[in-house]
Image (spheres, rainbow, N blue to C red):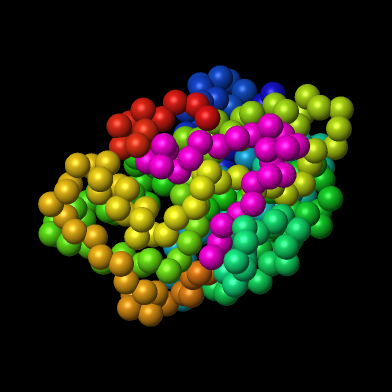
Amino acid sequence: MRYLVFGKNGQVGSRLTRLLGTDSKLIACGRGDADLSDASRLRALIESVRPDVIVNAAAYTAVDQAEQEPQLAAAVNAEAPRVIAEQAKKLDALFVHFSTDYVFDGTASDPYLETDPTNPINVYGATKQAGEAAVVQTGGRYLVLRTSWVFSSSGRNFLNTVRRLVQERPSLSIVNDQIGSPSLADDLAAATIKIVNTVTNSNEDLYGTYHLTGAGNTSWYDFARAIVAGLGSHHVSVTPIGTADYPTPARRPRYSVLNTDKIRQQLGVIMPSWRDAVARCLNDDVGAA
């Protein structure tokens, strides 16, 4: 299959590109290769490549900055997925689009199902929800994969922020009242390839929206504690604080755990636990999911 991957320099995109290898049937694009905010060039690129599978692992992910740049966030997170979905349908290509737990408002007390109503509480979440809706409404062959709290051994993410801070500070204060599921980019990439192979080789219609996250859930505080322990930085103390003690421009959902029963039952995907993923990431031993 000919793959076209957007977001080759991002956390998931870079891992996906690496796993797919240097095959001539893989075209991987970063921001310099494909400006997702330029719809006409995006259409032309997809038409020239004529892929069998398009994976959109690119997004405007600066949650707080999106509050100040809603139009740019919407262009990348909402309009670009619509354009890609339309071109994918035209070519009868499978479109795999990554989305987020932030499409939910966080008021639930049980893990969110794919069918639960979305109600984003910040610009980032609203633009990602609009992107999801555009993909679904286009009506082609699609997979929307909602994930959460993505981390990896490289790039800007919570694990690497904690890794840096333990070298600079004797203590850390981390929010303890936001709950989610950390997801290792390497595991997400490996799962994506498995999902594509399963869906394309099945006689059943397995297209649709799925939740794909690391197994288990935690708070940012306990996530940080696991990272600090894994680094062996026992001299650094980690103190829990409330969301109110760490104000940010964008509101965050308090509880955004995603129920992953559907992807396990229908596609046979079982993700490793987030604690296991942290250990492997810190040891740079990330293998396939």
Left or right relative to 226: residue 52: right
The residue under the point 49% across, 52% down is 217
Magenta region: 255-278
Q: Nearer the viewer, residue 25 or 183?
A: 183
The residue under the point 36% across, 74% down is 242
Q: Position of residue 86 (x, y in %)?
A: 77, 50
Query: From where the camera sits, is residue 73 visible?
Result: no
Q: Position of residue 10 (x, y in %)?
A: 45, 44
The residue under the point 47% across, 35% down is 186
**Image height check: is 75 above or below 279?**
below
Q: Nearer the viewer, residue 190 or 11?
A: 190
**Image height check: is 3 above or below 111?**
above
Q: Position of residue 63 (x, y in %)?
A: 46, 66
Question: Is-magenta flag for residue 262?
Answer: yes
Q: Considering the image in quadrants, where does the N terminus appear?
A: top right
Query: From where the camera sits, is residue 86 visible?
Result: yes
Residue occupying the far top of the picture:
23
- Across the whole image, how many numbered discs are drawn on residues? 0
Q: Position of residue 122 (x, y in %)?
A: 54, 73
Left or right relative to 193: residue 216: left
Question: Is-magenta flag for residue 68?
Answer: no
Residue occupying the far front of the picture:
109
Q: Nearer the viewer, residue 159 or 111?
A: 111
- Which image quarter: residue 243? bottom left
The residue under the point 45% across, 55% down is 218
Q: Nearer the viewer, residue 241 or 160?
A: 241
**Image height check: is 10 above or below 52?**
below
Left or right relative to 208: residue 41: left
- Which image quarter: residue 262? top right
